[in-house]
Amino acid sequence: SGSSDRPRDGEEGGERGLDDVSFEDTESGAILRQLTTNAIAGAVATSTLLPNTTVENVVVRYIERATGNVFEVDPTSASKKRLTNTTIPGVREALWHKDGEQLIVRYLTDNDVIKSIAASIGESFIEGGERISELEVTFMDDDIPFITSQDTRDRILYLTQKRSGGIVGLTADFDSSNREVIFESPHGEWIPQWTNTTMALTTKASGVASGFLYFVDEDGFLEKIIGDILGLTSNIHPDGTTVLYSQSENGSVSLHTLDIVNRTRETIAVATLPEKCLWSTRTGGIFYCGAPVSIPNGTYPDIWYQGIVSFSDSIWEVDLSRDTVRLLINPTNAAFTEIDVIDPFFGPNEEFLFFTNKKDSTLWSLRLNK
């Protein structure tokens, strides 16, 4: 982070040009494309109207990690433009509202203070022949350990630490207004999720510690969903009916589902971590995952979180209703590059699967042939 806590306007930064290169898997028809060469800190896909038409076009907005500038890229043509000139050096994370106009920006100061900013893209103006906007910012509390949003992405859920120990869970609008305390917990090591139907807390994962997943009810009480699982990490379906979770075993990881209503469990034929996966909301029982071609022996997920181990993933479609797994693309074969998938998200209509490569924080798209 820079020496100043304040974002600065007008500093130059920019995405280098990217050749329009795409890679198609002949069997699945999926098309892989690298959308940025510079590191990003978070992205969202939204629809815009093509100029002077009623034709909707998918675009991805992302924040550049080095500068904090917001860019927009067309996943079909890979053409891009800069939208803002407000400089926020060293952005670590950006959480976007679904409209692509509001976001939460997070970075670390030189004194290791976590700064969180509620930002929105302001009115545009012409500067140097370029139509540009400034980010309008509001600083939130310091040292917020985790922020997440609902799948519908209208509000955020975040944790703050109590002076007496433990944490408080709050919800707020994306501009950090209308805050409401939802729950309190004496235990502070939680990772929150917020689906369309429930809030959930998973204990921070380690391959040498038993993990637990709880749902939070309307009164703030915790209901245990899964417990006593080494290295537990989880990814809950937006409708709250199924949990995708991983387990550490024998120096590797295994992937499972839990049907919350029937309490039945299944093991998935693809071994990976659930945060590398994304549930379809258009087709029941389907999710997409980046899964390592091989998993070196070790303590998971610890050594992957710490960056000691990096994966080379293939991308798979898993259909629980048909009990099938389908390889969509192996980037090493198709693009001669290794991708360690993180932060997957869909574009409108789930035509595109977008994700970040953990190795260099670049943004990629996979056009799904449905």
Image (tube, rainbow, N blue to C red):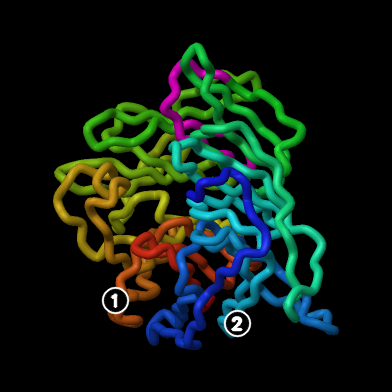
* Residue positioned 66% across, 59% down in the render: 86
Give residue 59's position: percent from left, percent from top. Answer: 65, 72
Q: Is residue 111 above or below residue 1?
A: above
What is the quadrant of residue 57 in the picture? bottom right
Give residue 279's position: percent from left, percent from top. Answer: 51, 55
* Residue positioned 79% across, 74% down in the render: 126
- Residue 332's tag is 1
- Residue 79's tag is 2
What is the quadrant of residue 68 in the picture? bottom right
**Which residue is farthest front?**
3
Horizontal arrangement in the rendering, residue 189 relative to residue 81 (left or right): left
- Give the magenta-colored segment's residue range: 184-201
Between the C-alphas of marks 1 and 2, the distance is 24 Å
Give residue 72's position: percent from left, percent from top. Answer: 63, 71
Sequence order check, earlier mark of 1 and 2: 2
Give residue 271's position: percent from left, percent from top. Answer: 28, 55
